[in-house]
Image: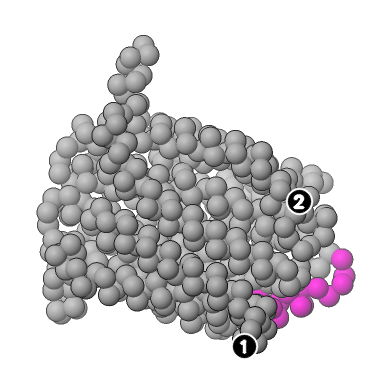
């Protein structure tokens, strides 16, 4: 039995070498990005609770936008990985063109929404339970931050269109380097602009936003210049800007398969921000505590998030080449490896997570809340790893309607109502509410297990 288990779920050295060759640059890239976000969060946190809360709320709104961009790019990525695996560079070019159009359209609509309804959206997360007027102050800081951040949405959209196509070719190192340069710039500029070091004025939350926007332009510039100066490695750029159209067949296929995926990302992100809004009715302290906990948890989550993303690349390439048996074998091994790594990371997070909130310049109540939220997230993390890997497995085979039901529909049918009812209509403490909402992931794990085991995703689409 042990031998059979090893054969099915544990790969050889060559397998893990290929897997980690793809995953490690992506993990490092996101680790640096989240580390800088963490440092940025700490620096803003030194300004005060109201500043930290205003910025945190805006970042929740931008989180929905980021996922919408990810969904728009992913709509074509499920075809891009298979086109590349098959050696169809023209098809890969059309998937890139679709990404560019879709991400820019999403960006335009988002800027319009933020410009006209920004104050209303931020106010949804502000509940003044203490009657101190702190929510009005937090709103003003949030609006200042949002006004600058909107300038950085266009380069982010363009960068994601290029970077996802580059990753589909197996070149994950270049996006990692671009990210390193950008986040390094972000960290330095944060320090200079927020606190007014040397000749720079003290700009507070505006400085934090400026640093992020400048870093996004730097990252996009590096990616675009590299891609166009290495066309032999990026064959999809051949003819990408010669004309503007797409063949009806490719466009229809991407829209039919990809729209549910794009819609799913937006709905899921909106669902998560709605859950946060449910928590926020318990007071500004909860918003601040969640902000600290989420920033720290994101540092640890990158392992399973990027290992899961690699599943779609590796499995997608096998499926595109028609090697279904290899796709199934690789998927089994990658899921087990992802959960194993995540269990180790969760253990580390559980032990050291309580030290991070002490860095912030905020009240003891907020620090205690953040510590409790971190502990709950660590306990649930291995289950999140499995459901995340299941999601990318289903997506690699183009089962976008299934992933839509599995991800966003589950969020709105199970997670959001649970958070709403427990936060509004029970006397449970906020930490207990948070635990029960997070524990809904166990239901998703069971669904994901049966979905993956059914092999409905073993499909060659191109």
Q: Horizontal and vertical percent for residue 254?
A: 25, 60
Q: Using residue 292 as the reference point, say whether residue 131 is left or right of it.
A: right
Q: Residue at x 36, y 19 (%)?
A: 5
Distance from label 2 to label 1 (Cα)? Answer: 38 Å
Q: Secondary structure at mark 1?
A: loop
Q: x, y percentage for residue 325? A: 21, 31
Label 2 or label 1, whichever comes before in sequence order:
1
Residue 309 tag number? none
Q: In the image, residue 227 lies at what x, y percent?
A: 24, 69
Pick the front one: 212 or 81: 212
Residue located at (57% from left, 83% from top): 147
**Residue 79 in the figure: left or right of residue 454:** left
Q: Which residues are magenta?
A: 130-144
Magenta-drawn stretch contains 137? yes
What label sits on residue 369 in the rendered view? 2
- Label 1: few (<14), some or many (≥20) within 10 Å? few
Q: Nearer the viewer, residue 414 or 276?
A: 276
In front of the other: 5 or 260: 5
Q: Is residue 84 above or below residue 327?
A: below
Question: Residue at 71% of width from left, 48% of height from top?
Answer: 355
Say whether residue 252 is visible: no
206 sits left or right of 247 in the view = right
């Amino acid at each position: 039995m042990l031998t059979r288990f090893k054969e099915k779920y544990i790969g050889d050295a060559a397998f893990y070498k290929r897997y980690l060759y793809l995953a490690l640059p992506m993990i490092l890239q996101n680790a640096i990005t989240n580390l800088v976000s963490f440092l940025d969060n700490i620096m803003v946190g030194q300004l005060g609770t109201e500043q930290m809360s205003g910025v945190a709320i805006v970042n929740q709104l931008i989180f929905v936008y980021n996922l919408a961009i990810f969904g728009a790019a992913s709509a074509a990525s499920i075809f891009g990985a298979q086109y590349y695996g098959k050696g169809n560079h023209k098809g890969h070019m059309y998937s890139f063109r679709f990404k560019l159009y879709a991400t820019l359209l999403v960006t335009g609509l988002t800027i319009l929404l933020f410009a006209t309804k920004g104050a209303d959206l931020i106010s949804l997360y502000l509940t003044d339970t203490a009657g101190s007027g702190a929510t009005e102050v937090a709103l003003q800081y949030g609006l200042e931050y949002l006004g600058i951040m909107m300038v950085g949405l266009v380069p982010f959209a363009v960068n994601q269109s290029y970077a996802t196509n580059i990753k589909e070719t197996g070149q994950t190192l270049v996006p990692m380097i671009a990210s390193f340069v950008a986040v390094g710039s972000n960290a330095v500029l944060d320090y200079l602009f927020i606190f007014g070091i040397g000749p720079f004025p003290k700009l507070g939350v505006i400085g934090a936003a400026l640093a992020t926007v400048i870093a996004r332009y730097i990252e996009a510039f590096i990616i675009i210049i590299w891609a166009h100066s290495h066309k032999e490695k990026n064959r999809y750029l051949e003819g990408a800007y010669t004309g503007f159209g797409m063949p009806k067949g490719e466009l229809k296929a991407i829209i039919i398969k990809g729209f549910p995926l794009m819609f799913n990302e937006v709905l899921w992100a909106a669902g998560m921000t709605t859950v946060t809004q449910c928590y926020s009715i318990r007071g500004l302290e909860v918003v601040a505590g969640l902000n600290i906990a989420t920033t720290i948890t994101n540092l640890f989550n990158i392992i399973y998030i990027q290992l899961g993303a690699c599943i779609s690349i590796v499995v997608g390439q096998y499926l595109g080449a028609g090697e279904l048996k290899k796709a199934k074998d690789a998927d089994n091994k990658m899921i087990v490896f992802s959960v194993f790594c995540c269990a180790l990371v969760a253990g580390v997070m559980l032990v050291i997570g309580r030290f991070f909130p002490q860095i912030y310049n905020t009240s003891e109540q907020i620090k205690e809340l953040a510590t409790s939220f971190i502990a709950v997230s660590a306990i649930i993390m291995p289950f999140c790893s499995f459901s995340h890997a299941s999601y990318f497995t289903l997506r690699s085979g183009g089962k976008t309607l299934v992933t839509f039901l599995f991800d966003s529909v589950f969020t709105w049918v199970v997670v959001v109502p649970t958070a709403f009812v427990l936060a509004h209509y029970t006397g449970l403490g906020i930490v207990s509410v948070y635990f029960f909402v997070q524990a809904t992931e166990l239901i998703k794990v069971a669904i994901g297990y049966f979905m993956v085991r059914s092999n409905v995703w073993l499909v060659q689409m191109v």
